Image (cartoon, rainbow, N blue to C red):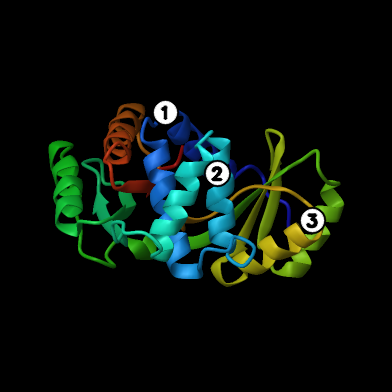
Amino acid sequence: MAGHNKWSKVKRQKAVTDSRRSKAWAVITRDIMVAAREGGKDPDMNARLSLAIQKAKGKNMPKENIERAIKRGSGEIEGQDYKECTYEGYSAQGVAVMVDALTDNTNRTVADVRSVFAKSGGRLAKSGSVAYLFERKGLIQVNSESIDELELLELVADSGADDMEKDEGTFVIITPVEAFETVQAEIANAGIGIEEARLVRVPIAAVKKETDQVRQTETLVTRLEDLQDVQEVFTNLEM
């Protein structure tokens, strides 16, 4: 079951993105609001909200900001109504790109995303014309010092995980979407701390490009990530 660092790129890309973003709090705030709206305001009964709160604390977000986001999401106080959207496209280099966003204005967001693609020589594509190139997976990170590797491997395998590997001080666990919450719950019930858990898009077959094409595609990704409504960007580029 153990892999060979094929998932570490997905993990590291997110870490680099988060450390670079000045908008980190805004991104997390929207995630908290949507989690509270969809699953309720009790983090003990809402795994997505619990993890969003953990992420907020990791970014040193003040407690009052977190509580306000929960109240807005649950409807206790008035706030914007955010919608989850996904946009599909291709870079000028022919790399498939998936853009996940949370927005209170879909017209603004699609215009912003389309503009970034156009200025980079790429284009937006029709819904479904790119998504089939990716698989939706759950990704869970656990501190490697908190548990023995074989014990964790046995636990997550029995819970329905697809893969697990050790990378830079963490265990990276990959699950099918339908087993994502079950695996999280089993890890938590075993008293193991979860550093991060989220859904990701993994390319079914990554494409190779020349160095300059890789750089140009990375520039497109960076510009998309800098848009205020964008949460994450995934590509099928082989790194």
Decide: is 31 above or below 136: above
Left or right: 5 as drawn, with respect to 59: right
Q: Nearer the viewer, residue 181 or 173?
A: 181
Q: Choose the circle earlier in sequence order: 3 or 1.
A: 1
> Residue 118 sits in which quadrant?
top left
Q: Of helix, strand and loop, which one carries label 1?
A: helix
> In this picture, is 176 found above or below 70?
below
The residue lying at 45 percent from left, 43 percent from top is 65
Q: Say which quadrant the N terminus sits in.
A: bottom right
Q: Which mark is residue 207?
A: none
Q: Identify whether 216 is placed above or below 180.
A: above
In this figure, which residue is indicated by the disc labeled 3? Answer: 153
Amino acid type, callout 1: Arg
Label annotation for residue 20: 1
**Disc 3 from disc 2: Cα separation:** 24 Å
Amino acid type of the residue tagged 2 in the rendering: Lys
Q: Pick the residue in front: 171 or 28.
A: 28
Residue 145's spot in the image, x, y percent?
Answer: 80, 38
Residue 139's spot in the image, x, y percent? 58, 54
Question: Disc 2 on helix, strand or loop?
Answer: helix
Q: Which residue is mark 2?
A: 55
Foreground pick, 194 / 239: 194
Q: What crowding class fits label 1: few (fewer than 14 Cα within 10 Å), some (14-19), or many (20 or more)?
A: few
Q: Is disc 3 surrounded by few (<14), some (14 to 19) or many (20+) residues within 10 Å?
A: many
For the residue marked with disc 3, what is the amino acid? Leu
Q: Point out residue 146 in the picture as x, y percentages from the top left corner.
A: 81, 43
First in sequence, mark 2 or 1: give its number.
1
Question: Marks 3 and 1, how far apart in space?
Answer: 32 Å
Callout 3: SS: helix
Q: Residue at x 53, y 54 (%)?
A: 198
